[in-house]
Amino acid sequence: MWPPWATARATLQLDRMPKTERLYYTDCYLHEFQARVLRWEATSDGFKVYLDRTAFYPASGGQPADAGTLAGLEVVDVIDEGDEIAHFLRQAPESEEVTGKIAWEKRFDRMQQHTGQHVLSAAFEKVGHYKTISFHMGTESSSIDLDSDRLGSKQLEQAESAANQVLFEDRPVRIFFQSADDASRMDLRKPTSREGEVRLVEVEGFDLSACGGTHVHHTGAIGLILVRKVERLKGSTRIEFVCGGRALNFARRDFRLLSEASLLFSAAPETLPGLIAKQGQERHEEMRGREKLLERLAEYQAGEIWRQAPVVEGRRIVRRVFGGDESAQVKMLAHALSKLPGAVALLGVKGQPSKLFFAQTPGGASEMGSVLKQTVAKFGGKGGGGRDFAQGGGLEESRLEEALAYGESLVTGTRKP
């Protein structure tokens, strides 16, 4: 049942509702506030609560919504609805006067990431005239997309260094408001299409942007900006980065992983890249040597099998099913058999999925790709290939013998295609 104050509020017309005062606009560090509930509306999984004033930041501009509590109830989400801000709760508040509490650690983390993004975007623009076309703040890292895919490693390091220099200098971050006309005449990093009053965020002597997000008071509070990943996209470059506490956590994790790797390799951290490259090359050579040995073994086995195979109309038909751990060797065996005179290989490998390898001596009378396609069409699976070699699989293990026999009947002509 609605409390009396809620019933009275519900009778008001929506166009008479006042705007929600956005407390975070002028005080990003405010994390506890008093407010009055104007009304609430039931939703499919809870309630939308509207206040006369709020410090909760709604999801906007690449920054997620604040978390926290309202009247002791968890705020599930915060949505900007133009003049009003909707707070999503699972229960409706019991009092008209409520206390809101922002989850401060999350808020401050996002202030570090968002202000860090302003500084990093400005740094890229100053270093190489690269403009930021989008910004996304994730739970572990954030990213900006730049308007060019020609960013080099030197420019990346220059921008990262320039951004961190601004942090080291602990420059003031000022938030103020201007009319849209006045703002349009200012040196904004990115033009704004907003009308009326425009909220501006200025990093002293480095960046000026229109932004509604939450920010720190001084760049030193950002701590550190660390680029983690660079991804080339079509016509743009995605820069993944972390700031502040996130940068510290990543640095700790990197140090831990590097230390563990050093112990495993019994080597100093600075020697690991060269050591890993050397071992990788050695492993590649060992694998290549193993492949050559397997090829020689396959050639030997092929000779033995070929000599024992029955001769049908001048061709030696090899038909066998192998165990599931022999797939690579069986493929080599099929190729080795095809190098022998007048050979036809119809080989199956058990497993999930099962595999088929059909091959013949080049110039043979059959079309192996067609034989395999007809076989899998009858017994299930898929596959294909050319005239002299084809492969496929996916049929049930229990039908491999029957499938190979069917393939042989197509090859020998005892069953017409």
Image (spheres, rainbow, N blue to C red):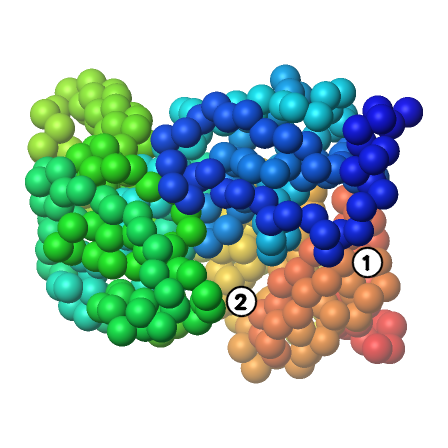
User: Residue 73's quadrant in the figure?
Assistant: top right
Q: Position of residue 414 (x, y in %)?
A: 85, 72
Residue 63 image label: none
Q: Position of residue 210 (x, y in %)?
A: 35, 59
Mark 1 lies on residue: 380
Q: Nearer the viewer, residue 185 or 334?
A: 185
**In this view of the protein, can residue 273 be seen by the observer?**
no
Q: Is residue 377 left or right of residue 225?
A: right
Q: Position of residue 126 (x, y in %)?
A: 15, 64
The quarter of the picture where the C terminus appears is bottom right
Residue visible at 35% across and 45% down in the picture: 114
Mark positioned earlier in the residue sequence (2 or 1): 2
Residue visible at 31% across and 69% down in the picture: 182
Q: Is residue 294 above or below residue 104?
A: below
Q: Nearer the viewer, residue 264 or 95?
A: 95
Compute the Cα span from label 2 to label 1: 25 Å
Secondary structure under badge 2?
helix
Q: Are marks 2 and 1 in contact (CB under 8 Å)?
A: no
Q: Is residue 106 left or right of residue 293?
A: right
**In this view of the protein, can residue 331 be seen by the observer?**
yes
Mark 2 lies on residue: 338
The quarter of the picture where the N terminus appears is top right
Residue visible at 44% across and 39% down in the picture: 24
Q: Is residue 106 above or below residue 331?
A: above
Q: Is residue 355 above or below residue 131?
A: above
Q: Residues within 10 Å of mark 2 (few under 14, many from 20)?
A: many
Q: Is residue 301 above or below residue 362?
A: above
- Nearest to the eye among marks 2 and 1: give it: 1
Q: What amino acid is found at the position of numbered circle 1 in the picture?
A: Gly
